C-alpha cells in the first residue's frame, strides 16, 4: 500500500512497531519488579523509565546502585551500555536532520532500538517519503513501544511489592543480562570482545569503586576493534568478487 | 538487599536522563551529518557486547544469593542461559531457559 499522506505514514509506523510490544512489555515488567525489589517505589520506577527510556542502561544502573558503586561509575557504565543510541542518532541524521530543532529533540528522545531498526529499513529500502512522512513514520513506530515500556514498568513495580523476599530474585538480573548477550554475537569480533571482557572482569573485580567494570569494558572494546581489523570480514550475505567501497564512508 | 540512598538514586536517574538524551541528540541535533573518526566508531561497535559481559561475569562467579560464595548451580544456570541466547538468538528463549533451570536446580538442591 502506497504511503500518500503524513497520517498514513504514522499508521504504517504504528503497525510495524506494534509487534515489538512483545519485547518492551516483558522487559518493562521485569524492570518494574526488580526496581521494586531494590527498594524503589512505583512513582520512582515510573520516573526512571520515563526519564531515561533505555532498558539496558536502566538495568545496569539498578544493579550497580545495589552494589553501592560510586555515582560516577554508575553513570559512566550505564551510559556506555547506551552508546549505541548515539550511533543510531548518527545514522538517522541524513533522513531526519532537516526537521526543525524541536522536532529533532522529540525524535532524539524516541530513538530506541525498535524505532531505529524499523525506520532505517523503511527509509533505506522503502518508497521515497517526504521529510514529514519520515518523521511521522518514526514517531509511529514508538506508538506502542513507548507507552508499553512505561506502563509495564508501573505494573511490574506494583507486582514487585507482592513478591515475597524469600523468592530470591537476586539472580534474575544477572540472568536477564546473560540472555541479552547471545543475540549480540553477530560476528567473531563480537565474540572476542565478549570473552576478552569476561576474562579481564574477573581479576579486575578486585579493583576498588567498581572500576573493574570500566577497565574490563574498555579491554573488551579494544579486543573487538582489533579483531575487526585483523579478521577477514564475515557474516556478509554473499562474498562479493567486486571490491567493496571504502568502509570509512559508511559512518 | 541494601536500600539505595535517595540522593544517589535521583542523581543517577537525572544524570542518566540527561546523558541518554545527550547521546541521542548528539548527531541529529548538533553534529549534523559530520562523520566520526573510523577508529572511534570501530570501538563503539563493541561497547555493549563488552560492558554487559564485564558486568555480569563477576555476578555469576560470585553470586549475590550465596553471599559471594562460588556456586556450581549459579555458574551452570548462567552458562546455560548464555548458550541458549547464542543458539536461539532470542532474549526471551534464553531468559526462560535460565529461569526454568534456576527454579529446577534450587528445587532439587537448594
Image (spheres, helix red, strand yellow):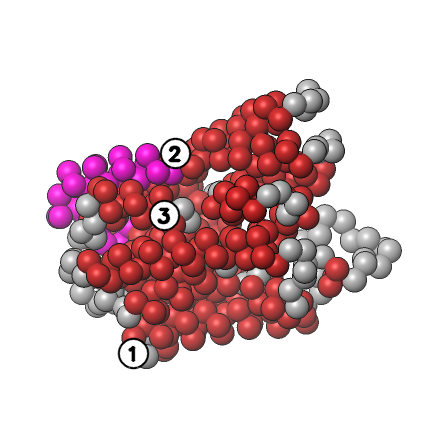
Q: Compared with residue A217, is residue B98 higher up or lower down, i.e. above or below?
A: above
Foreground mark, 1 or 2, reads 2
Task: Report the Cα–Cα distance between label 1 and label 3.
Answer: 30 Å
Whole-percent x, y for residue A107 in the image: 53, 43
Whole-percent x, y for residue A135 in the image: 60, 36
Whole-percent x, y for residue A57 in the image: 39, 55
Q: Compared with residue A18, is residue B35 higher up or lower down, i.e. above or below?
A: below
Question: Which residue lies at the image location 38% right of the left edge and 57% below the top edge?
Answer: B16
Mark with earlier residue (2, 3)? 3
Question: Which residue lies at the image location 23% right of the left edge and 66% below the top edge?
Answer: A68
Read off the magenta span.
Answer: A147-172
Task: Place residue A157 in its image quadrant.
Answer: top left
Give the residue at mark 3: A51
Q: Which mark is residue A148?
A: 2
Give the residue at mark 1: A208
Mark with earlier residue (1, 2)? 2
Element type at marker 2? Answer: helix
Name the residue nearer the viewer: A127 or A214.
A127
Mark with earlier residue (1, 3)? 3
Amino acid at each position: 500500500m502506497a504511503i500518500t499522506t503524513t497520517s498514513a505514514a504514522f499508521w504504517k509506523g504504528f503497525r510495524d512497531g506494534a509487534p515489538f510490544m512483545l519485547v518492551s512489555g516483558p522487559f518493562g515488567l521485569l524492570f518494574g519488579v526488580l526496581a521494586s525489589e531494590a527498594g524503589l517505589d512505583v512513582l520512582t520506577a515510573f520516573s526512571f523509565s520515563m526519564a531515561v527510556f533505555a532498558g539496558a542502561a536502566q538495568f545496569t544502573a539498578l544493579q550497580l546502585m545495589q552494589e553501592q558503586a560510586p555515582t560516577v561509575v554508575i553513570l559512566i557504565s550505564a551510559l556506555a551500555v547506551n552508546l549505541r543510541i548515539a550511533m543510531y542518532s548518527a545514522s538517522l541524521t541524513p533522513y531526519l536532520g532537516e526537521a526543525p530543532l524541536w522536532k529533532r529533540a522529540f525524535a532524539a528522545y524516541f530513538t530506541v532500538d525498535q524505532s531505529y531498526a524499523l525506520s532505517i529499513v523503511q527509509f533505506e529500502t522503502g518508497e521515497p517519503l517526504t521529510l514529514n512522512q519520515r518523521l511521522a513514520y518514526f514517531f509511529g513506530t514508538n506508538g506502542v513501544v513507548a507507552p508499553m515500556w512505561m506502563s509495564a514498568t508501573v505494573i511490574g513495580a506494583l507486582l514487585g511489592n507482592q513478591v515475597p523476599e524469600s523468592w530470591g530474585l537476586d539472580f534474575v538480573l544477572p540472568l536477564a543480562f546473560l540472555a541479552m548477550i547471545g543475540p549480540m554475537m553477530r560476528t567473531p569480533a563480537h565474540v572476542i570482545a565478549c570473552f576478552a571482557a569476561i576474562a579481564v572482569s574477573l581479576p579486575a573485580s578486585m579493583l576498588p569503586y567498581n572500576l573493574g567494570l570500566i577497565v574490563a569494558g574498555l579491554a573488551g572494546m579494544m579486543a573487538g576493534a582489533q579483531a575487526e581489523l585483523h579478521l577477514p570480514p564475515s557474516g556478509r550475505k554473499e562474498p562479493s568478487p567486486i571490491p567493496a567501497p571504502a568502509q570509512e564512508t559508511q559512518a | 538487599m541494601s536500600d539505595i540512598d535517595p540522593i544517589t538514586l535521583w542523581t543517577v536517574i537525572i544524570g542518566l536522563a540527561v546523558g541518554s538524551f545527550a547521546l541521542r541528540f548528539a548527531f541529529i541535533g548538533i553534529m549534523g551529518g559530520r562523520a566520526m573518526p573510523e577508529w572511534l566508531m570501530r570501538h563503539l561497535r563493541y561497547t555493549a557486547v563488552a560492558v554487559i559481559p564485564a558486568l555480569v561475569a563477576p555476578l555469576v562467579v560470585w553470586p549475590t544469593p550465596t553471599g559471594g560464595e562460588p556456586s556450581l548451580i549459579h555458574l551452570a544456570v548462567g552458562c546455560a542461559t548464555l548458550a541458549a541466547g547464542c543458539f536461539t538468538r532470542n532474549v526471551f528463549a534464553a531468559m526462560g531457559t535460565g529461569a526454568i533451570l534456576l527454579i529446577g536446580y534450587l528445587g532439587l538442591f537448594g
